[in-house]
Image (cartoon, rainbow, N blue to C red):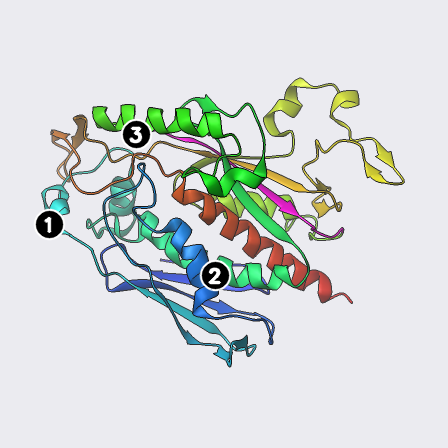
Amino acid sequence: MSGNTFGTLFKITTWGESHGKGVGVVIDGCPPKIPLNENIIQAMLDKRKPGGSIASTTRKESDEAVIMSGTFNGLTTGTPIMIMVYNKNADSTAYEPYADLFRPGHGDITYDAKYGIRDFRGGGRASARETVARVAAGAVAKAILEKENINVIAYTISLGGINIKNYDLSIINNNMFYCPDLEAAYEMEKRVIEVKKKGDSIGGIVEIISKGVPIGLGEPVFDKLDADIAKAVMSIGAVKGVEIGSGFSASEKLGSENNDPITKEGFKTNNSGGILAGISNGDEIIVRAAVKPIPSILIQQETINKDKEPKTITIKGRHDVSAIPRINVVCEAMISIVLADHLLRKKAYI
């Protein structure tokens, strides 16, 4: 299997499976003398950790980060950084009945067709457990960005058809969904409880805003900043759509409506989402990710086995009702990784 490495100068390689001994990441290209310790990484991992909200799985993992290399006295050394997180609460028994069945909405059937072998325990490499490694790498990327006063923030703007009506980023850490609208967050909680009782799942939309990004990040034409952001976010398992700035709504606008007027103080609007011609324009970068419902549900579904015989399946085990809010920090991490990579690439010209 290839495709486990992402980035150009700031490069990450993730490894590990859901029910293996652990998951981790090797980061190559991190500059020296960046403040980094396990507490910095842990702060981000705790946002992704299971059991943080009523929408989360009951699988309890401490997700304790261990830095194996690349730091000395609390600073990066410029050598490869390896971060390890051990799996301590994996229970594979619930997955044994599905060893020969393909779970709808999962990668079981495609992994089996491509490789002829698959780890059926929690989806193996295709599990959301892999995102632990991305978040750990994202913490390192954010440490780089922090020195440049760049801040990446992810929050929920829609969940299960409940959309925000108010927008106050100062309150996103005051509710379990990282939602900028407390009234909407309350309705989201009721929606999750309702869906959970039915044994079903829901999706939503995460918005990610990057503040303080300097003008000039991005490498046209195939390494455009927005292209790399889209790839980074789309590589997250539960994400099925990405838009930047006005996104799909731009298709319904006139050019005179979608263009951002320019003044000596900057742009009057931000339909571009902070990126023009693949290069950051100094405005805030606005990204939205469409998150699908979790495919593991308690409702009976049609499927087939490896012999293509028709079967029915009801998924047992410990699963989220929604990937939101745990996926929020994963989106934040992936965009931070892209920005750190392009920041280093821009510095290479100087």
Question: Label 3, on which residue?
Answer: 201
Q: Position of residue 245 (x, y in %)?
A: 65, 34
Range drawn in magenta: 202-215
Residue 207 sits inside the magenta stretch: yes
| Residue 76 appears in the picture as rendered | yes
Relative to 251, is 177 on the left or the right? left
Amino acid, disc 1: Thr
Q: Residue at x 22, y 56 (%)?
A: 19
Q: Residue furthest bottom?
A: 72
Helix or strand or loop: what does disc 3 sit on?
loop
On the image, the x and y values in percent for residue 318 come to: 21, 43
Mark 2 or mark 1: name the one nearer the start of the chain.
1
Q: Disc number at residue 93? A: 1
Q: Which residue in the structure is indicated by mark 2?
A: 137
Q: Secondary structure at mark 1?
A: helix
C-alpha gap between disc 1 and disc 3:
22 Å
How crowded is the residue under tag 2: few (<14 C-alpha within 10 Å), some, or many (20+)? many
Q: Residue at x 28, y 23 (%)?
A: 194
The reply to whether discs 1 and 3 touch (Cβ–Cβ < 8 Å) is no
Which corner quadrant of the image does residue 106 belong to? top left
Q: Is residue 277 left or right of residue 130?
A: right
Q: State the CA–CA distance, disc 3 to disc 2.
A: 29 Å
User: In the picture shown, does residue 282 fall above or below 163?
Assistant: below
The mark that comes first in sequence, 1 or 3, is: 1
Q: Within 10 Å of the Cα at label 1, are there few (<14), some (14-19), or many (20+) other Cα atoms?
A: few
Label 2: element kind: helix
Q: Residues within 10 Å of mark 3 (few under 14, many from 20)?
A: many
Residue at position x 77%, y 28% in the image? 259
Q: Position of residue 104 (x, y in %)?
A: 25, 33
